[in-house]
Image (cartoon, grey):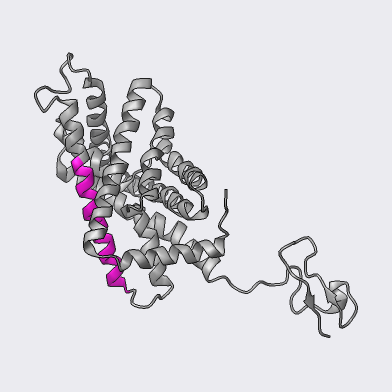
C-alpha cells in the first residue's frame, strides 16, 4: 500500500475541496445524486443481510461496499463536502468564498436527497410487489425486511421525540460521532494511491459508524422516506424535526471540527517545532558536541537532520 504522509495529504484534501467548489452545478448535482443513490442502496443491502442472518455485524461489514464504490467513482456525499470544501476556504485558495462553500453544500444536499428518494421508491416497489401488497401480508416474502425498514423510521423519530430535548441532543451527538468516522473514511481515499489501499482505509471507519448505529444524514434520506412509503406510523415532519435536522448539524460539527480543522491546523498550518527538554536554543555542549560541530538534535528520530551548532 502506498502511504501518503499527512502534510501531503492535507494539500491533496485542500485541492479536492477547491475543485468541488468550482465544479459546475450540473456535475455537482449528478455526482451527488449518484453518490446518494449508491450509498443508500448499500444501506438497503446491509439491512437486508442483517435481517436474513440475524447478525447486525454482517450488515456493518458489508455496508462500506457502497461508500467505497462511490468514492472510487468520484461521486459526492454531504458528509464528505462538509470536510473538503471548508478546507479550501481555510487555506484561502483564490476565489474560494464562504458563499461558494455553502453553494456546494446546498447542491450536494439536493443531489443526495434525490438519489436517496429514488432508491427508497425502488425498494418500496420491490418489497410490496408494486404496492399490490403490504409488509404485513404473511404471503409477502419481503414482509420481515419491510417491517424492519418501517421500525427503523419509527424508532429514530418518535423514539427520540419521547425523550424531548435529550432525544434531540442524542441524535445530534450520534450525527457528530458518525461524521467523525465517515469523514475519516473520506480522508482515507487520499491516504493511499493504490485501489486496495484506498479500499482498506475507507472500509474501517465506515464499518465502525454503521456497527455503532450512528446517524448519517444521507443514509437517513433513504431510511425515513422508505419507511413512510411502507406505511410506518410517523410523519415526514417527525423525520425532519427529530432526525434530519439534528443529524445534519451533528454531521457538520463532527466533520468540521474532528477532521477538517484538525488536519488543517496540525498538518497544514503546523507550528515550528520546539526543542524537547530545553527552554531555548541548544548549545553545542547541551547537544553533546564540540563548539562549531554538527550534532543530532534527537538521535532517536530518523527524520531529524543534523544541524550546525553556532556558539
Q: Is residue 252 left or right of residue 259?
A: left
Residue ranking furthest to the right? 290
Q: Which residues are magenta?
A: 97-118
Residue at the (32%, 43%) spot, across then down: 39
Image quarter for residue 6?
A: bottom right
Residue at the (22%, 39%) spot, across then down: 119
Image quarter for residue 274?
A: bottom right
Establish if 112 lies above or below 88. above
Front position in the image: 158 or 243: 243
Residue ranking furthest to the front? 194
Residue at the (46%, 46%) spot, across then down: 202
Q: Is residue 228 left or right of residue 58?
A: left
Q: Position of residue 264 (x, y in %)?
A: 49, 66
Front position in the image: 72 or 186: 72
Q: Position of residue 268 (x, y in %)?
A: 52, 69
Residue ranking furthest to the bottom? 311
Q: Is residue 127 left or right of residue 286?
A: left
**Res 157 seen here:** no
Q: Position of residue 192 (x, y in %)?
A: 52, 52
Establish if 228 lies above or below 302. above
Establish if 3 lies above or below 151. below
Main secondary structure along the magenta-highlighted residues: helix
Residue at the (35%, 53%) spot, across then down: 74
Front position in the image: 75 or 128: 75
The stretch drawn in magenta includes residue 78: no
The stretch drawn in magenta includes residue 111: yes
**Res 229 seen here:** yes
Amino acid at each position: 500500500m502506498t502511504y501518503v504522509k499527512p502534510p501531503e495529504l492535507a494539500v491533496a484534501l485542500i485541492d479536492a475541496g477547491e475543485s468541488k467548489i468550482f465544479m459546475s452545478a450540473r456535475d455537482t448535482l449528478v455526482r451527488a445524486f449518484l453518490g446518494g443513490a449508491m450509498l443508500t442502496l448499500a444501506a438497503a443491502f446491509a439491512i437486508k443481510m442483517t435481517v436474513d442472518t440475524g447478525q447486525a455485524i454482517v450488515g456493518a461489514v458489508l455496508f462500506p461496499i457502497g461508500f467505497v464504490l462511490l468514492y472510487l467513482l468520484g461521486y459526492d456525499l454531504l458528509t464528505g463536502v462538509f470536510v473538503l470544501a471548508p478546507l479550501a476556504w481555510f487555506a484561502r485558495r483564490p476565489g474560494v468564498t464562504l458563499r461558494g462553500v455553502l453553494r456546494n453544500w446546498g447542491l450536494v444536499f439536493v443531489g443526495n436527497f434525490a438519489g436517496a428518494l429514488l432508491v427508497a421508491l425502488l425498494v418500496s416497489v420491490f418489497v410490496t410487489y408494486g404496492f399490490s401488497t403490504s409488509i404485513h401480508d404473511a404471503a409477502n416474502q419481503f414482509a420481515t425486511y419491510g417491517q424492519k425498514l418501517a421500525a427503523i423510521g419509527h424508532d429514530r423519530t418518535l423514539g427520540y421525540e419521547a425523550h424531548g430535548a435529550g432525544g434531540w441532543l442524542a441524535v445530534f451527538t450520534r450525527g457528530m460521532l458518525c461524521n467523525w468516522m465517515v469523514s475519516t473514511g473520506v480522508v482515507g481515499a487520499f491516504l493511499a494511491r493504490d485501489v486496495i489501499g484506498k479500499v482498506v482505509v475507507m472500509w474501517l471507519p465506515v464499518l465502525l459508524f454503521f456497527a455503532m448505529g450512528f446517524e448519517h444524514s444521507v443514509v437517513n434520506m433513504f431510511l425515513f422516506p422508505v419507511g413512510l412509503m411502507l406505511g410506518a406510523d410517523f410523519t415526514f415532519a417527525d423525520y425532519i424535526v427529530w432526525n434530519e435536522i439534528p443529524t445534519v448539524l451533528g454531521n457538520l460539527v463532527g466533520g468540521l471540527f474532528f477532521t477538517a480543522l484538525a488536519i488543517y491546523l496540525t498538518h497544514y498550518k503546523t507550528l515550528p517545532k520546539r526543542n524537547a527538554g530545553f527552554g531555548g536554543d541548544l548549545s553545542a555542549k547541551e547537544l553533546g558536541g564540540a563548539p562549531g560541530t554538527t550534532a543530532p538534535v534527537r538521535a532517536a528520530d530518523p527524520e531529524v537532520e543534523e544541524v550546525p551548532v553556532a556558539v
